[in-house]
Image: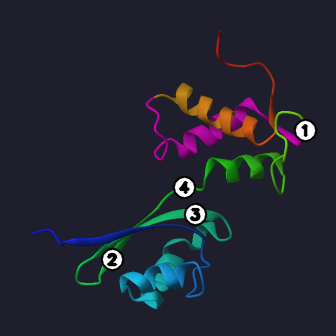
Amino acid sequence: MAKAISGIIKLQIKGGAANPSPPVGPALGAKGVNIMEFCKQFNARTQNSAGKVLPVIITVYADKSFDFVVKKPPVAVQVLEAAKLKSGSAESNRVKVGSITWNQVTEIADEKMSDLNAFTQKSAMRMVVGTARSMGVTIKGESPFNE
């Protein structure tokens, strides 16, 4: 029989760097989860992507046990990495801060496809392009979409 779920916690934590300080400690402590056990498991599972911001969804059960799913880094973080920027533009419609190529857009869309609400690579690429535009990042090259 399935365990009763008492709550779901969504956090964004740097890979390999979970510790009991905020935001991790208070969020898990409120649900009664063993914070150190979560930190050990999360850090062990995310060693290979150390330093990258990773969304994690923690399912807490009624008996205070937990499961968690680590997702791919957010599209905005991947766009910043591809463009080698620290942050996006404050006025994205006026001030452009960097650019990426269509090949980089394709790579980001392919990597993030499982987490996006998209059925085709084309629609995933459109989501990545929209995120890049809203950050003040331009796309270099010829669009692969025939419109």
The answer to which quarter of the image holds residue 8 is bottom left
Q: Amino acid at mark 1?
A: Val
59 relative position to 14: left or right:
left
Q: Amino acid at mark 2?
A: Phe
Q: CA distance from mark 3 to mark 1?
A: 28 Å
Q: Which mark is residue 66?
A: 2
SS type, badge 4: loop
Q: Which residues are magenta?
A: 96-119
User: For mark 4, what is the residue?
Assistant: 72
Look at 36% across and 87% down and name the residue there.
32
Q: Secondary structure at mark 1?
A: loop
Q: Quadrant of the C terminus?
A: top right
Q: On the rendered structure, is 7 left or right of 86?
A: left
- Mark 2 closeness class: few <14, some 14–19, many ≥20 residues within 10 Å: some
Q: Which residue is mark 3?
A: 54
- The residue labelled by disc 1 is 95
25 horizontally vs 61: left or right? right
Which element carries disc 2, helix, strand or loop?
Answer: strand
Alpha carbon separation for disc pair 4 and 3: 6 Å
CB of mark 4 within 8 Å of CB of mark 1?
A: no
